[in-house]
Image (spheres, rainbow, N blue to C red):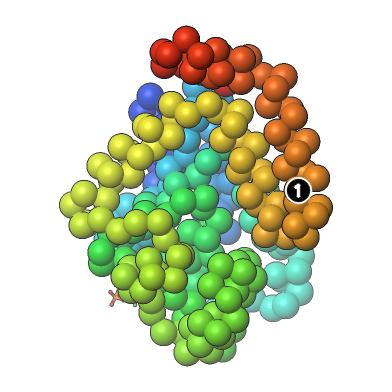
Amino acid sequence: SNSFEFIETTTQGAIGTIELNRPKVLNALNTKMISEIVQAMEGFDKDDNIRVIVLSGKGRAFAAGADIDEMANASAMDLELLNQFVDWDRLALIKKPIIGAVHGFALGGAFELALCCDLLFAAEDAEFGFPEVNLGVMPGAGGTQRLTKLVGKTKAMEWLFTGKRITAKEALHYGIINQTFSKELLFEETYKFAEQLAKQAPISIRLIKESVLKAIDHSIYEGMQFERKNFYLLFSSEDQKEGMKAFIEKRQPQFKGK
Ligand code: CO8
């Protein structure tokens, strides 16, 4: 699984980890790295032994954004024909829960990547932000959309207009991240959480993720129709029978993910 050039993947029990691995340039995201991330995610998504995906960065940052050297001389036509955001669309289709563990910088495209995670844990030194405005561009991988849906127009406009960095504390305050930890404990605590999550009924987690993501893009009515079908669908799983039987028999359930 380590045939990748710009990322490293490892597994530990039911947890599949993807680490961004270009530390010399603070993990600047080039096109190939994004494509490798998506390939690795899809690999874990298909792997029956994996229940949770963890995404983090090697070195002193999660990542400092898209690779500016790679983009600097691009024309609009180059970018249109490259069609790189198709990879980002595929990222949004990953079914298993993705936990981002962010330390240091998560800027630009890296903040967008973090916003693609389902849960975010951050070190106290983490800094998020969209500095694109300082380069004469703007976010292109969902930043204006995901940040606005998450925190509302007021702060989104401010942060996108100024490029100002958001501290871990602020990110927690605005609901961008789930929790902060000291830098030393970030990975340990992330894995502790991931291990607990891996014990939950996998099909429940899968359909909950799908339903919550639906809420972001659809009306309550449509979302509820969707939720209802997923709720019914769970009653065709062995895990629903086991989960309820275990409750009645006053014992711990043994979930199999089917
Ligand atoms: N691209 C390329 N190289 C980078 C990047 C980057 N985004 N960020 C840092 N590096 C390189 C530096 O050039 C430097 O290389 P070298 O040692 O060869 O000079 C090395 O990484 C270390 O960086 P610094 O010496 O600058 O480290 P500092 O601690 O002094 O500063 C900062 C850290 C503040 C993070 C600084 O590096 C910085 O401002 N980086 C750029 C941040 C930025 O503007 N990011 C947004 C990029 S645009 C974007 O993300 C658009 C997304 C749209 C689509 C997404 C597709 C993937």
How many other residues sit within 10 Å of disc 1, few (<14), some (14-19) or many (≥20)? some
Callout 1 secondary element: helix
- Reading the image, the residue beneath label 1 is 224
What residue lies at 43% left-to-right and 26% top-to-bottom? 199
Q: In the drawing, does residue 80 fall left or right of residue 200?
A: right
Residue 254 position within the rendered picture, expressed as x and y whole percent measured from the top left: 47, 14
> Which is more toward the observer, 206 or 215?
215
Residue 247 position within the rendered picture, expressed as x and y whole percent measured from the top left: 49, 18
Residue 138 lies, with reference to residue 26, above or below; the image says: below
Three-letter amino acid code at disc 1? Met
Count of numbered circles in the view? 1
> Which is more toward the observer, 184 or 136?
184
Residue 211 position within the rendered picture, expressed as x and y whole percent measured from the top left: 67, 45
Residue 75 lies, with reference to residue 52, above or below; the image says: below
The quadrant holding residue 164 is bottom left
Q: Residue furthest left?
A: 184
> Which is more toward the observer, 73 or 141?
141
